[in-house]
Structure formats: structure tokens, C-alpha cells
Amino acid sequence: MTGIVRSGTVLLWRKCTYRAAVSNSRVIVVGKPDHTDTARGEVWAWEHPEEWIQAYYVRDQQVSADDGRRIRETTDRPYFPDDWNAAITWEQGTVDLVTESGYFENSFDADESFDRRFEKVAAESVTAPYRTQEAQ
């Protein structure tokens, strides 16, 4: 199976994700711009928490299994929407805030940072429960 090194909600628009193949209790991390593998890997890691904790947190990151479990407990269930409007709205708020602080000279349309040709790719690669955001 495939597991993914989590990087948070930026998964929707990252140009390169990290895929970790869990095999024979080893984790091999490689760069790969493949949102289908990323989504499926996130789901796999969620559905196989002990294997993921051992393979990634314990063996790769060198933390204890208990620490890996604590980290996992703070992680939300993966969510892959087939509509990025909410993410783009949130990102625009960040752009506006940073612009108001003076860090950016000029604001820009956050929508330009998203390649909507890939909007449904991750959602279509996972089962329905992972296309709906669970109340946290």
C-alpha cells in the first residue's frame, strides 16, 4: 500500500507531494506530483494508523510510538473536496492579511494560484466518506 507524508491542507495545490511507500516495515520517500496517489495515501494512513505510526513516525522520524499516536490524535480525518471555492476564499483572506501588513506590495487574486483542472482529481480517487468534511 501507499502512505503519504502529511503536509496539511496545502495538499490541494502543492506542486509536488511526497509519497511514502510502506513496504517490509520501511518507508521510502520520493517526490511525485501525483494527487491521486497523495489522496489514496492519506486515506491509507488514516485507515491503518498503527502501521503508519510505526513506519513513518517511529522508523522514519525517530519518535516514540506513543508520540506518534499523540501526533495522530491531533490530525483531522483526510478531506478531499471536489470544489476548491472554500480553500480559495480562505487563501484570499491570507493574501489580503499579508498585503495589509505591508509584506506584499500589491494584493493578487488567490484563484490564480490554483489550477482548477485538477480540482476533482483527488476527490474522485477516494471513497465518498473522504469527500465530505467531518465535523471536528
Image (tube, helix red, strand yellow):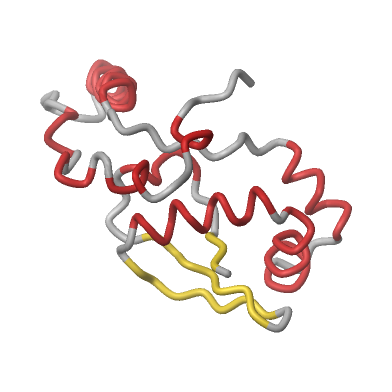
Q: Position of residue 19 (x, y in %)?
A: 47, 67
From the viewer's perspective, is 124 left or right of 43?
Answer: left
Q: Residue at x 34, y 45 (%)?
A: 124
Q: Position of residue 136 (x, y in %)?
A: 64, 21
From the viewer's perspective, is 133 left or right of 69?
Answer: left
* Res 15 → quadrant: bottom left
From the viewer's perspective, is 10 left or right of 25?
Answer: left
Q: Residue at x 75, y 59 (%)?
A: 53
Q: Nearer the viewer, residue 36 or 102?
A: 36
Q: Nearer the viewer, residue 92 or 77?
A: 77
Q: Residue at x 14, y 28 (%)?
A: 105
* Vertical relation: 24 (above or below) 78: below
From the viewer's perspective, is 82 left or right of 3?
Answer: left
Circle count: 0
Q: Nearer the viewer, residue 43 or 17?
A: 43
* Res 24 → quadrant: bottom right
* Furthest-front residue in this view: 128
Q: Position of residue 26 (x, y in %)?
A: 68, 80
* Furthest-bottom residue in this view: 24
Q: Residue at x 57, y 24 (%)?
A: 134
* Res 30 → quadrant: bottom left
